Image (cartoon, helix red, strand yellow):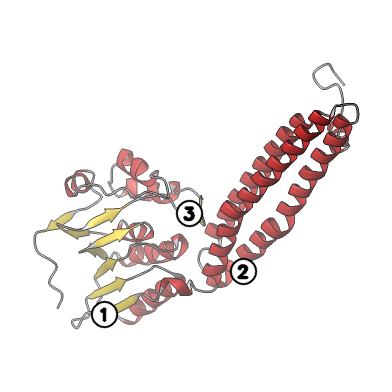
Amino acid sequence: MNRWFPTSPIVLLRKYCSGSYHPILTLMIGGACVVIISSVLDRAIAFTETFFKSDINNYLIVLVGVVIYYLILSPLVLIWLGSSCLSAYKSYTKAQSARSIWAAVGVGLISVCLAYAYFHSVMVPQLLDVVSAVNGDPNWGKATVALSPAGDTLLVQGPITQETATKFEQTVKLHSRIRILHLESEGGRYDAALRMRTTVQKLRLETYVESKCASACVVVFLAGYERIIYKNAKIGFHQGSVGNEEVGSLNDIIEEEIAMGISEEFLRRAWSTPANQMMYPSTGELLATHAVTKVLNTPLQVK
């Protein structure tokens, strides 16, 4: 080995696990490893969720991945971190005073508290969120999917879930006269919105919002051949999330929307809004950036 790598990674890992380093250094190295491993697996789960977006049954694949991650890998990583820190504390306190021993115990308690906080603030919400998606999001309620008497306007009102996307797809398949998709939704599942978005693009439907369309609903709205709103309507943008964590990237749909003539600067700014916030652009900005193609002074008359 050269002077930059005086020993092999295996030897370094063995020394780390045997507690050969200072307990503070052990905790810092272990914490960095936990963050790196968690970030990599979070992105892998987000990618899997997006990749298998077309079929609710494939959510089982995501669920299996989440269970393996949160209920198997994460506890093992935390046990590894805890045992390594404990070994370091024991080695360090052998020749130290009682004061040093209590300091080491304090550091150990802090690490346990941080791990507990991470588990409950990040891991549990994400796991529950995926389980909810697999079960059809029963706590979100049912969306209304209703065809106008004339058969040319379809109303989708309520949460955008896999069930909502399926009803939408079935309805437009049965009624070829549909030309306008009227959206009224606070949001929902990103993958379900992508299903609806694909159908809107394929059929070149116009999209219309009279009151409010936010989050995943906007993914569908911006796919419209013509994007129409009533003057008092609110269009809300933010990043997607699973549980309390922002996940995934909207680069693919942003590129599609840029190709439709919508301002790139506006899209990247709007879709980068944190998941716990919502950006509501003014009607003037929506028009100026071509996110909206027409604003009505009176609500759309549905026949």
For badge 3, the amino acid type reads Ser
* Residue for badge 1: 147
- Extreme-top residue of the structure: 3
For badge 1, the amino acid type reads Leu
The answer to whether residue 236 is seen in the rendering is yes
- Extreme-right residue of the structure: 94
Residue drawn at (42%, 71%) of the image: 140
Quadrant of the image for the C terminus? bottom left
What numbered label is drawn on residue 241? 3
> Local crowd at mark 3 within 10 Å, few (<14), some, or many (≥20)?
some
Residue 191, how many percent across, how many down?
A: 47, 62
Look at the numbered disc 1 and give the secondary structure of its residue.
strand
1 or 2: mark nearer the eye: 2
- Extreme-left residue of the structure: 297
- Kindly report the distance in space between the C-alpha atoms of the residues bearing marks 1 and 3: 31 Å
Q: Earlier in the sequence, mark 1 or mark 2?
A: 2
Q: Is residue 289 left or right of residue 165?
A: left
For badge 2, the amino acid type reads Leu
Q: Is residue 116 left or right of residue 181?
A: right
What numbered label is drawn on residue 60? 2
Look at the numbered disc 3 and give the secondary structure of its residue.
strand
